[in-house]
Amino acid sequence: MVANTRVTVDRMDFPYRLAGRRRPDQPAVLEAAVRDRATALANFLGVRTGELVLGGRSMGGRICSQVVAGGFAAAGLALVSYPLHPPGRPERLRTSHFRELDVPCLFVSGTRDAFGARTELEEATSTIPGPVSHVWLEDGDHGLRKHGLNAAAADAVVRWLAATFVLPSDG
């Protein structure tokens, strides 16, 4: 971890998960949930949503990126295991909104992610107008299940935040 930094994290579950369902809600419902939760967090912290970095793992990150591409104010995006396409379906890219992302973006991915190879993700993210950073976790799959990779992903996010934004210190 980066010494002497403080990062507030608010984790959310989508409505379908809270209801105990496995099938995700429609994108409009998922996007509304992100906007509502980010707005509530900003209000709680006494800041604007434009001071928050949104993000998540897999579909959660994709939905956050769609919300920001749709005009919701955020300082940046931290996307872990972004699902570039369904496994084995590289023609079904989930990137049409990338050209609207004008904020700093971090993509943390495993080098063995079936949802998008390194070259595919780097090519797709080259269309993002905002600054893009990549962190590759060796031998990581989409779930980053290899020992230590979840912690490595979290550390990569904190390091990127410290390098990209002014973070409050503990001391």
Image (spheres, rainbow, N blue to C red):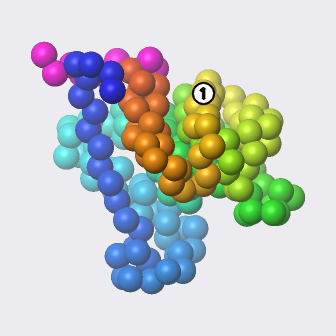
**Magenta-drawn stretch, dominant element (helix, strand or loop):** loop
Quadrant of the rendering where the C terminus is positioned = top left
Q: Please report the residue visible at 29 percent of the width from the left and 49 percent of the height from the top.
A: 10
* Camera-nearest residue between 89 and 142: 142
Q: Please report the residue visible at 28 percent of the width from the left and 33 percent of the height from the top.
A: 7
Residue 141 picture location, percent across and down: 61, 52
Identify the magenta region: 163-171
Q: Please report the residue visible at 35 percent of the width from the left and 76 percent of the height from the top.
A: 18
* Camera-nearest residue between 156 and 52: 156
Amino acid at pointer 1: Ser
Q: Is residue 141 above or below residue 86?
A: above
Q: Which residue is most to the right? A: 91
Q: Is residue 11 above or below residue 69?
A: below
The local crowd at label 1, few if under 14, some if 14 to 19, many if 20 or more residues have their Cα within 10 Å, is some
| Image side of residue 148 versus residue 65, left or right | left
Quadrant of the rendering where the N terminus is positioned = top left
Q: Please report the residue visible at 60 percent of the width from the left and 54 percent of the height from the top.
A: 142
* Camera-nearest residue between 124 and 96: 124
Residue 48 picture location, percent across and down: 32, 37
Residue 88 drawn in magenta: no
- Would you identify the image quadrant in which residue 129 lies? top right
| Image side of residue 116 versus residue 163, left or right | right
Residue 164 drawn in magenta: yes
Q: Which residue is most to the front? A: 147
Q: Which residue is most to the left? A: 171
Numbered disc 1: secondary structure: strand
Q: How many marks?
A: 1
Residue 108 picture location, percent across and down: 56, 39
Can residue 75 be seen here? The reply is: no
Q: What residue sits right under mark 1 in the picture?
A: 133
